[in-house]
Amino acid sequence: MARTAGRAGTIGMIIAIVGVIFAVAGVVTWIVVDNQLAAEKITVSEDADFLAGQDVTGPFTAYAQAQVINKHALEATGGKTYAELAKDDPARTTAMQASFLRASLFTSVVAFGVAALAVVLGIVLVLMGVALRSLAATPARELAAP
């Protein structure tokens, strides 16, 4: 029984360490993406539906700016998307650039989501590892007691 408890304790420690790594990686990712967006010095357009005038440094401001870019692009193209415009239409370049900008902003939104997921998953793994180590350290007679 002691051998099994030792293995469980070791596995618990490994799970907790992996959890710490996930949590740290998530925080670092969040900070890097935040800093990269801030370095671009983007401000949410004043005609945005929400967060107008805010600096784009987080997932919500990035999403708001992506939405307003789409609105501006559709205004410039008469309501047509890039795929709907004729190949010789000069507005096609505007639609393409807007699409690239939106894709970049949406990529940052996804990166923030993945970072948050990694932090939460890391915390859960740490808690699971600590619980498993605690359970492994509990004498078998205490576990069997009603």
Image: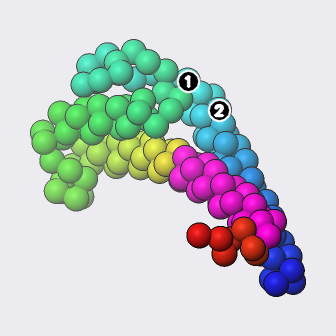
Residues 24 and 69: in front is 24
Q: Residue 52 falls in which quadrant of the image?
A: top left
Q: Name the amino acid, label 2.
A: Asn
Residue visible at 60% across and 34% down?
Answer: 34
Magenta-drawn segment:
114-139
Q: Indicate the position of residue 60 as horizontal and vertical percent values.
A: 41, 33
Q: Main secondary structure of the magenta part?
A: helix
Q: What element carries label 2?
A: helix
Q: Name the amino acid, label 1.
A: Lys
Q: Indicate the position of residue 112 as horizontal and vertical percent values.
A: 53, 44
Residue visible at 83% across and 72% down?
Answer: 10
46 left or right of 114 in image: left
Q: What element carries label 1?
A: loop
Q: Indicate the position of residue 146 as horizontal and vertical percent values.
A: 59, 70
Residue visible at 23% across and 34% down?
Answer: 71
- Characterize the local packing of mark 2: few (<14), some (14-19) or many (20 or more) Cα atoms within 10 angstroms: few
Looking at the picture, does residue 11 appear above or below residue 89?
A: below
Looking at the picture, does residue 21 appear above or below residue 60?
A: below
- Which residue position holds label 2? 35
Q: Is residue 58 magenta?
A: no
Q: Residue 75 falls in which quadrant of the image?
A: top left
Report the colour scheme.
rainbow
Upstream in the sequence, badge 1 or badge 2?
A: 2
